Amino acid sequence: MFVLRPESAADGPAVESLLDLCFGPNRHAKASYRFRGGVPPVTSLSFVAEEEGTDLVGAIRYWPIRLGAASALLLGPLAIRPDRQGRGIGRVLVFRTLADALALGHRLVFLVGDPAYYRRFGFEVAPRTIVMPGEQPWRLQYALLGDGRLLEAGGTLRPERPLERPEGADVALDQGIRYNQPVGA
Ligand SMILES: CC(C)(COP(=O)(O)OP(=O)(O)OC[C@H]1O[C@@H](n2cnc3c(N)ncnc32)[C@H](O)[C@@H]1OP(=O)(O)O)[C@@H](O)C(=O)NCCC(=O)NCCS
């Protein structure tokens, strides 16, 4: 039995330990981490899975990125503690946060991962014209939410730098639906 709840600042060390456990301490060398340096995650979409109110067994985060003029999200990291994998925790975290992302107005999500896992959530391999430097093209995937469309035929994904945000952009990124109660899985 596990519950989902928004990640809090106090969860930081436990989430970092979980990510080290799942991806190894060299995870920061991955190309996708360049999109995370110096930019905070989208707090309203950062969730953890907790078992019986004690151990943290899963975590998901999203980051703001851009494809040309279009705002998008970068899903990840997503990590489930190895001894709790295969129990649907990853599935619940992804479905729940994608639904929240849609409700918050997001329409385009990218990730770098295994297509065989992410297909079930509506992700497909991105067109070769869309590039994340340093990542293998077959692992770069995208999903359109709601009435989302790929407005750019191609281009290089780049991080959303705080200084580049147009005035008011924070509203879409950070105005979260606040969950006061843990949500049963
Ligand atoms: C990948 C991961 C997030 C999946 O979470 P999970 O809670 O274990 O997965 P779920 O219980 O929701 O789903 C299990 C299903 O996913 C499948 N699956 C798990 N990892 C997979 C992978 N890498 N490729 C394809 N399918 C995968 C399982 O075979 C199972 O399939 P089934 O539903 O047909 O039986 C988790 O295993 C994990 O943290 N792995 C290590 C870190 C990682 O690779 N993160 C993702 C990179 S972006």
Image (spheres, grey):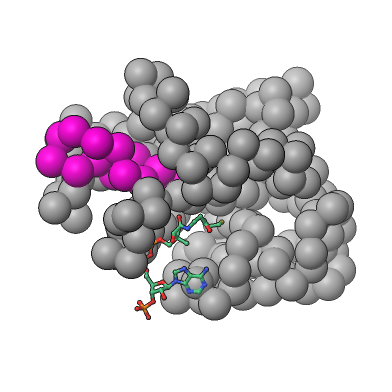
Q: Is residue 71 left or right of residue 42?
A: right
Instruction: Indicate whether 43 appears above or below 24.
Output: above
Residue at 51% x, 63% y is: 145
Which residue is nearer to you in this view: 10 or 99? 10
Picture coordinates of residue 30, whole percent (x, y): 73, 45
Picture coordinates of residue 178, whole percent (x, y): 29, 32
Q: Main secondary structure of the magenta part?
A: strand
Q: Is residue 158 left or right of residue 139?
A: right
Instruction: Indicate whether 173 appears above or below 78.
Output: above
Residue at 79% x, 50% y is: 157
Instruction: Indicate whether 68 appears above or below 115.
Output: above
Q: Is residue 174 left or right of residue 157?
A: left
Q: Is residue 69 visible?
A: no
Which region is colored magenta?
Answer: 48-60
Ligand 1 quadrant? bottom left
Q: Quadrant of residue 62?
A: top right
Instruction: Indicate whether 126 appears above or below 112.
Output: below
Picture coordinates of residue 103, whole percent (x, y): 39, 50
